Image: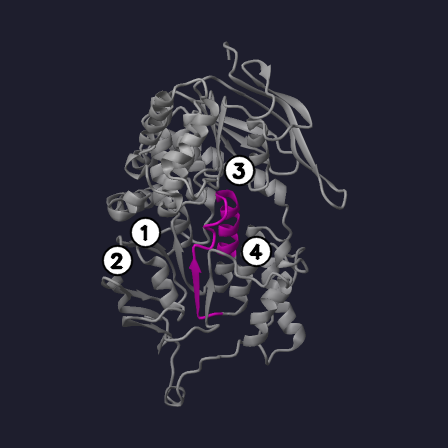
Amino acid sequence: MTMQPILSLKGVSKSYTGKSGSVSEVLGGVDLEVAEGEFVAILGFSGAGKTTLISAVAGLLEPDAGEILLRGKPIDGPDRDRGLVFQSYSLFPWLTVEANVALAVDAVHKDRSKAERAALVRQKIELVGLDHARERKPAQLSGGMRQRVAVARALAMEPQILLLDEPLSALDALTRAKLQDEIERIRKEEKRTIILVTNDVDEALLLADRVAVLTPAPAARIGRTFDIAIPRPREREAMNDDVAFQRLRKEIVGYLGGLNVAASGEEQSTIALPNVTPLDLAPPPHAYRDAARSAVESRYLEFYKLRKAYPTPKGELTVVKDFNLLMDRGEFISLIGHSGCGKSTVLTMAAGLNPISGGGIVLDNREIDIAGPDKAVVFQAPSLMPWLTARQNVALGVERVYPHAARAERRAIVDYYLDRVGLGDAKEKLAAEMSNGMRQRVGIARAFALSPRLLLLDEPFGMLDSLTRWDLQDVLVEVWNRTKVTAIMVTHDVDEAILLADRVVMMTNGPNATIGKVLKVDLPRPRDRKALLEDPKFYQYRQEVLHFLAEYDHGPAARAA
């Protein structure tokens, strides 16, 4: 760079000492320069130190070594020249949108008149598209709207640099897309220097001028930077067809995959799965058992005119209507659609957890009416017993469906699946001491260990960063390849839907949601993420799903975002 950068990080290091005296080196010498008006995305794995780095730039913590320079001068604590937006929006619940933003303005712009401050508040609220909600309180806002308030508040400080610490990661895909568009508009209109911490490769490619990748913990540093020479404006669907986007995306994903493999160094399991059959806890009627029975392969799972309605003060609200789907044994289906389209409602009815209002669901020639271990469910939030170890959590279900097996066989089943999900060294670790990613691995191991007729996955990776999600998608693919259990997965993630499924079932917006389109994924198995990124069919499928979602990007869900 010929001009002096607005921000320089030179050898920034940070360590933390635990209660036991052990030292964790989080940042191990980060070097980065940011030009004025540049948009830089910092991409990294969970626990790589992204938040530690952005907090150091914001002046909220002091590095152990190195220096952070703003226009050539060392920073000294937090200041109005750096506006920060966190992942969790910290708003005052008793104040309106306007009052929350005004609080920041009054604190940092004391030299301005009351009228000037009020005009500034209004301008920033309008900029993030919340003029219609100025008098609402946070409790009356959606998650996306609350995050817009946080962005408006940071912008109202008129900082030289806007720091965004994963501000969109807790939001659903539709709301996230809308806020990405908002951030792009702010970049264009405000011409402000922006640093975005993210774990989403597509988000980085859509918004940034440059992507800096943090290496995995411990002692994270900037491994590589990638220049994004894709012309603006960047449109999601058009970018999907852009050869430069595909090449750059493949390069970044490949680099991250290499870092992940080097960091994990996973070993193969040596435990064999015992040849025992689980107990059928919901056997069919005697008449059925007495009849000659052939194994059901086609029409193994059938949704017939499925309907779900809830009573409301204004009358009955039909969430899902006329949902019809046939699945073969061993088929994997992804269910995708915008928030509120009834995906999870369909899944919970298939699990027997939610009463059916009309129609029916038949699994292996039996109508589903109650929950049971023949239908294993993995939810978005891992529901483990926190006081039990990983092994004990999985063993709870195994002991119920394999009571006739020897203790050693049951233990082997538990160990086999924990090894398969990469927890061979953490079997005795308490669930309470695990990261979200580790807990979700236990949940996946528990589900497969039940040997269910049907595996139901309700956004199991939705709470995880995209890099941990890739890891667990690979785990899921690997274990599913061995079991070929019939599976339905609800997801917001287009790549995930295509990677995992034989068919992608797309749902229309609610209420009265139904199947809008079914896409057959004709890609060879076993599937590998790197190989997929080189297959032109993958981008064609991606475009079909993106186009469908764009068509249904309207209505109440869009307004509330």
* Residue 99 image label: none
> Mark 2 sits on what residue?
513
- Give the distance between the C-alpha atoms of the residues marked 1 and 3, in whole angstroms: 28 Å
Quarter of the image for residue 149 reads top left
Viewer-nearest residue: 361 or 307: 307
Viewer-nearest residue: 101 or 42: 101
> Mark 4 sits on what residue?
439
Q: Is residue 246 left or right of residue 468?
A: left
- Give the distance between the C-alpha atoms of the residues marked 4 and 3, in whole angstroms: 23 Å
Say which label, 2 or 3, has the lower sequence index: 3
490 over 118 or under it: above or below: below
The amino acid pointed to by label 3 is Leu
Instruction: Assign a secondary structure to mark 2.
Output: loop
> Mark 1 sits on what residue?
337
- Give the distance between the C-alpha atoms of the residues marked 4 and 1, in whole angstroms: 26 Å
> Mark 3 sits on what residue?
256
Instruction: Assign a secondary structure to mark 4.
Output: helix
Question: Mark 1 and mark 2 in contact (Cβ < 8 Å)?
Answer: yes
The amino acid pointed to by label 4 is Arg
The amino acid pointed to by label 2 is Ala
- Give the distance between the C-alpha atoms of the residues marked 2 and 1, in whole angstroms: 10 Å
- Nearer to us: label 4 or label 3: 4
* Numbered range of the magenta stretch: 452-478
Determine the residue positioned at 57% across, 33% down. 214
- Nearer to us: label 2 or label 3: 2
Q: Residue 477, position in %: x, y?
A: 48, 55
Say which label, 4 or 1, has the lower sequence index: 1
Q: Residue 552, position in %: x, y?
A: 25, 47
Say which label, 2 or 1, has the lower sequence index: 1
Instruction: Assign a secondary structure to mark 1.
Output: loop
Q: Residue 524, position in %: x, y?
A: 41, 52
Determine the residue positioned at 50% across, 37% down. 254
